[in-house]
Amino acid sequence: MKIYVVRHGLTEYNKQHLINGQLDDGLAPEGIEQARKAVSQIPKGITHIYSSPLMRAKQTAEILNSALNITISYHDELKEIDFGLLTGTDFSDEIDKKHCSLRYDWRPYNGECAEDVKKRVLKILKDIKAASKDGEALIVSHGGIIRMISFLQDGVLMGEIGNASVHSFDLDRIVRKIKLLSWNIWGGKYLDGIISFLKQADADIIALQEVIEDDDGGNTALAISKALGYECAFNVDMVIPSKWTGPVRDPEKMIRFGNAILSKNKIVSSASVQLSENRTAIQADIQVGEMVFHTYSIHLKHQHVENPDPKSEMLQKEQVDTLINLLPSEKAVIMGDFNSKQGTYPLNEMDKAFLDTENGDSTPTWTLYKEGCDKCPLGLLNKFDYIFTSKEIEAVSFSVGDSKASDHLPVMADIEIRA
């Protein structure tokens, strides 16, 4: 989504190479003329001007709007960097170098640091993206803010930013929303229903558990990815009695099963990860814009809801400890069937290290069918299915889907990833 950004026109402080910061000074006569000339550079289709409330930006926005005649709103997030006690002093070489390199920290002078500015800039960009369509938004702000927007988009530092200069940026490269979905599909017994739900859900990245591969090579993960048109990474290097992967299969047959990750975006690499004996996860690195996300689909050992088995508890502890030790601390998404009640070791440890996208709530996801486990009570009584992320990722929504195509319900989360 393209936006346009204009720096305010020239001020008297600019002419004297003094620090404006958040000083509320107006435009010099030359700055007024610069703003008038900038009108011809504003593309058609702008419907809203988002301006800093500082006088020099406000005057520039009003001059531009004399030709556009659209709505202007003023936002503190677009104010120039607060230099604190340095405001009004000379822009020394040392200050200028720190300012342009985004290595500044003016908090000792009662001002802001670069991280403070980054947070407020990201907030307003997120709001603008939610409220606008491609090419509709025009920002009028300051050199420090434009330099930060440029860095968030490209990771490089801009040089000189001229007064009343016009710039364009792509918000999709700065703030991107991704829809995640995780589902234990019970071996794909009700495959048509699974595919139908997944098509309607239209998630960007899907984690599946209990995908199976038959002796003749039939593979539920590949069948689903082909139907959706997604890239796919999977493993089927575990075995389980077939009675647990659907209600009418031969209970005496051992079947290969595992996990899968499906993605609309490019899967750069993938690997099977050993968590314990006969229990693996699938890991896939997924390219999303300029970033690579480390995505995991996991399925811990089943543990009975009532009268838990100590051996299964130990296996779950081994599996989650192994998982946490190998997980990266950033750009990580962990989805799957944890087979654990709230308050148990696996979920407590995951909560310490990562963010639960349901944010503390616990909507039940299991079980719809008695055949899911003949020793556990029937009904949607427990939440086994989770989506966790590393702590820099923001979850903006979470929901549990409605489908009878498995003994588990699918879980979904929208996350925002930022530069």
Image (spheres, grey):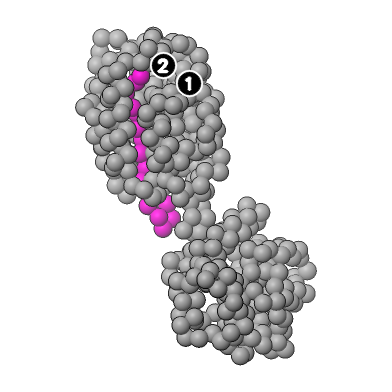
Residue 344 in sight in this render:
yes
Label 2 crowding class (10 Å Cα cut-off): few <14, some 14-19, many 20+?
some
Find residue 209 and name its label: none
Percent of width and height locating residue 174: 50, 59
Residue 60 versus residue 76: which sits nearer the camera? 76
Type of amino acid under label 1 = Asn
Residue 225 in sight in this render:
no
Type of amino acid under label 2 = Val
Find out whether residue 261 is within the magenta segment.
no
Find residue 305 and name its label: 2
Along the horizontal axis of the image, is 185 left or right of 148? Answer: left
Percent of width and height locating residue 284: 33, 43
As drawn, 135 above or below 363: below
Pointers 2 and 1 in contact (C-beta within 8 Å): yes
Residue 391 versus residue 336: which sits nearer the camera? 391
Find out whether residue 296 is within the magenta segment.
yes
> Which residue occupies 49% across, 70% down?
105
For the N terminus, the image quarter is bottom right
Mark positioned earlier in the residue sequence (2 or 1): 2
Q: Which residues are magenta?
A: 288-303
Q: CA distance from mark 2 to mark 1?
A: 8 Å
Percent of width and height locating residue 409: 48, 24
Instruction: Determine which residue is flagged by label 1.
Output: 382
As drawn, 369 above or below 230: above
